[in-house]
């Protein structure tokens, strides 16, 4: 059936995140081919003749953009709660973000009074899954949620990068979100900005926040410069920087895994793998500290140290043959190094 737009109650519109690119394509398709699929509604229990939209908010916004007065609709004979749950079950997981799940959980819990156990039963999930979703939406700053809802920031980027950044420095996170709005940055570029902020000096962080596009160009130029150096030392530098990036990513994944819950078997394997990684990193770090960091010290300081060590071993100062024997052993080890 066809329903006038002014008869639609769109109170659940904020449950879904906007995607400006998809909406522009939908507007173009609607203008050229007309409506392809109907929206899903239920009758309003409070206002006779009005309908509550369960699914199809993008299509309604597209209809408004092309100045349509009505939309095709399917009326479900369900309560609001049942309709929302059924629609959630019909959608494929990849069609929803974790934040959209969280919005729905909050509406069912706070808006309709369902217990967490009841929501878990209806979704076929564990109660801990419901609790984590509710905790996520309550923890996320409202300004960040608004950026996601408007489509200015992808949900994945908001949760993986902006949320930990906001925990560290709320003002910088909010300013950065404002300055990248409308730039259409990819998740990879936002990850680049996050890494640059986390690893950078105060000056570098200010560049990231105030001039994000410039900061991205600087990082790209640095990567190109490093890729030109294919010597063993250059490759070592790249590997160590990758280790730093992987460590940052592992920390973020740990945050997300703890949010979702880590099962005991996989937790045991994680602990073993971490111990192995620590041992390898410790050996690598010891050699770098001894043979690279030492060489990077000012030459005057190094010469002074070597002179002091040489004086301590000077055979002229030795009082017996044991001292000379130690000196010979030191020279012998040096030849084999």
Image (cartoon, grey):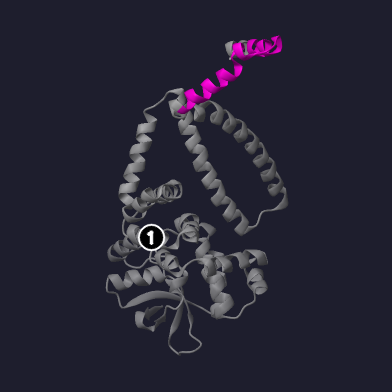
Residue 198 in the image: state x and y as whole percent: 46, 49
From the image, give the main secondary structure of the stretch colored magenta: helix
300 or 142: nearer the eye? 300
In this rendering, the answer to whether 207 lies above or below 11 is above
Residue 218 in the image: state x and y as whole percent: 33, 42
Helix, strand or loop under label 1: helix
- State which quadrant residue 221 falls in: top left
Q: Is residue 298 visible?
A: yes
Q: Is residue 125 visible?
A: no
30 or 276: nearer the eye? 276
Q: Quadrant of the N terminus?
A: bottom left
Q: Is residue 178 left or right of residue 328?
A: left
In this rendering, the answer to whether 197 lies above or below 105 is above
Q: What residue sits 37% from the left and 48% below the top?
A: 204
Q: Which residue is mark 1?
A: 177
Is residue 313 part of the magenta span, yes or no? yes
Is residue 325 part of the magenta span, yes or no? yes
Q: What residue sits 38% from the left and 66% below the top?
A: 150
Residue 202 in the image: state x and y as whole percent: 39, 51
Q: Is residue 165 left or right of residue 335?
A: left
Residue 181 in the image: state x and y as whole percent: 34, 60
Which portion, as a residue range, is magenta?
301-329
Classify mark 1: residues with Cα within 10 Å, few (<14), some (14-19) or many (20+): many
């Amino acid at each position: 059936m066809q329903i006038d737009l002014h008869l639609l109650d769109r109170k659940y519109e904020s449950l879904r995140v906007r995607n400006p690119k998809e909406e522009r394509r939908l507007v173009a398709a609607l203008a050229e081919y007309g409506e392809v699929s109907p929206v899903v509604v239920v009758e309003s229990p409070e206002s006779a003749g009005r309908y509550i939209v369960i699914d199809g908010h993008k299509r309604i916004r597209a209809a408004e953009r092309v100045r349509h007065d009505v939309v095709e609709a399917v009326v479900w004979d369900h309560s609001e709660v049942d309709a929302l749950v059924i629609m959630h079950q019909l959608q494929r997981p990849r069609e929803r973000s974790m934040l959209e799940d969280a919005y729905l959980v909050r509406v069912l819990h706070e808006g309709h009074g369902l217990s967490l156990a009841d929501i878990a039963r209806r979704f076929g999930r564990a109660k801990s899954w419901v609790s984590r979703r509710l905790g996520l939406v309550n923890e996320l700053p409202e300004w960040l949620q608004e950026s996601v809802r408007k489509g200015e920031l992808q949900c994945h980027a908001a949760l993986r990068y902006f949320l930990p950044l906001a925990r560290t420095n709320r003002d910088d996170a909010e300013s950065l979100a404002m300055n990248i709005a409308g730039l259409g940055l990819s998740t990879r570029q936002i990850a680049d900005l996050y890494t640059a902020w986390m690893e950078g000096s105060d000056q570098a962080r200010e560049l990231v926040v105030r001039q994000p596009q410039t900061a991205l160009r600087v990082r790209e130029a640095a990567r190109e410069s490093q890729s030109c150096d294919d010597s063993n030392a250059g490759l070592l530098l790249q590997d160590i920087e990758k280790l730093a990036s992987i460590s940052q990513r592992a920390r973020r994944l740990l945050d997300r895994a703890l949010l979702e819950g880590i099962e005991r078997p996989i937790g045991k394997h994680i602990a073993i793998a971490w111990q192995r990684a620590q041992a390898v990193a410790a050996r690598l770090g010891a050699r770098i500290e001894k043979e690279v960091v030492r060489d990077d010290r000012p030459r005057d300081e190094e010469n002074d140290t070597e002179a002091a060590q040489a004086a301590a071993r000077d055979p002229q100062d030795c009082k017996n043959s044991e001292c000379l024997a130690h000196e010979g052993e030191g020279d012998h080890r040096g030849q084999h190094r």
